[in-house]
Image: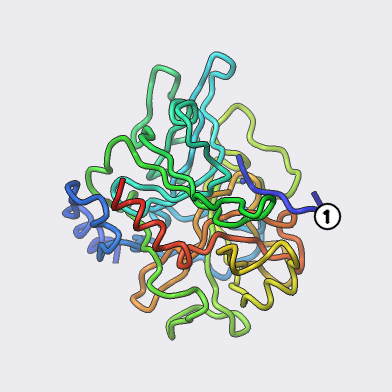
Amino acid sequence: MKTTFFLFPVLVSSVLLHSIYAHVHVTIDDPSSALSSSMCGVATNSIEAIYPGSANRIVGGKTAQERSWPWIGAIVRKPSIWSAIYQQTCAGTLINAQWVLTAAHCVDPTAKFIRQNLIMLGATNLTAAFANASAHIRPANLYSIAKVIVHEQFDVPSGTSANDVALLKLAEPVPFFSETISPACLPTASIHDIPANSLLDGGRRVCFTAGWGLLAEGAPGVRDGVGSGSNTLLQVNVVSYSAEVCTSTLGIWFKPEYKTLCAGTDLGGKDACTGDSGGPLVCKAASGAFELQGVVSMGFGCGEARFPGIYANVFALKSWITDKITTN
């Protein structure tokens, strides 16, 4: 894995907000209504509050604060006759009351996948979320999947990261948004259109990704179920690179026409990894809200120097996303 690319399946004021969230209800009649919701991308505890920080490993990450990633969801495999445990395999991002955006390589648009997998929302600590859970006892905020829509041009050409997105429709809409469950905003502009209020590192835009994946390439995963590599949600800051830099560093593995972008750090050590796939790359917009700019897709190992991670480019895929939601 040190020399070849691989996908990352399985995968680096509070009182006022509480008052606002307590009264936010979604419109179920129009499943696309929350795509433009003024409440998207808002968190009680700012993702930026722990930036910058010393690296302690999603790779190179820090423990995310409670109520700082209300849009992140864990894709979890149900217990079965072969395994009596819940197992997180990928991540996703809530983008409205009934839809989660994830990576195409994380899912399978079959009845078997729908039957065997669930989505946990509103959790940062999976141990706590699944405490006392069993095949017969279902935790709160664990949603069944009604439909899986994979991008028709995923992996075209074959062996690429092209169009690595899929939509998961929840069997039941989230009844209301809160401090712990609310959507991320879809992007209003390209990740390369940097607003004046952005965090910068060497003139480049700082964004954030998070997940429950492995803490390092080849590291052992969590035993006995739940998180792939960590039961605690970890987040990491990365910088967004230009398409030219992505192409020069990643070579044939990166092409903008694949609807991808790349982000990482020059020295490595900060990245998504196995179990983080499908999770969000969010950046602060001019409005102050966090927009979903990327979906964790693939990478050259985890946190390798000079080899940034590859993400599906949500802005480039936005029309596909909104069309599928409004027609399904």
The quarter of the displayed image where residue 61 is located: bottom right
Q: How many marks?
A: 1
- Where residue 32 sits: x, y (%)? 27, 55
Question: Identity of the amino acid at label 1?
Answer: Thr
- Quarter the C terminus occupies: top left
Q: On the picture, is 26 further left or further right than 69?
A: left
Extreme residue in the top direction = 81
Seen at 31% across and 61% down, the residue is: 40
Which structural element holds mark 1? Answer: loop
User: Looking at the image, what colour scheme do you see?
Assistant: rainbow
- Where residue 244 sits: x, y (%)? 67, 78
Q: On the picture, is 247 further left or further right than 240?
A: right
Q: On the picture, is 113 further left or further right than 238?
A: left
Seen at 27% across and 42% down, the residue is: 173
Q: Which residue is mark 1?
A: 3
Seen at 63% across and 35% down, the residue is: 222
Extreme residue in the right direction = 3
Q: Which of the pair 166/277 is nearer the observer?
A: 166
Q: Is residue 143 above or below residue 201?
A: above
Q: Is residue 160 above or below residue 47?
A: above
Q: Which of the pair 255/3 is nearer the observer?
A: 255
Q: Which of the pair 3/41 is nearer the observer?
A: 3
Seen at 71% across and 61% down, the residue is: 253
- Where residue 189 sits: x, y (%)? 42, 75
Q: Residues within 10 Å of mark 1 (few under 14, many from 20)?
A: few
- Where residue 324 sits: x, y (%)? 36, 51
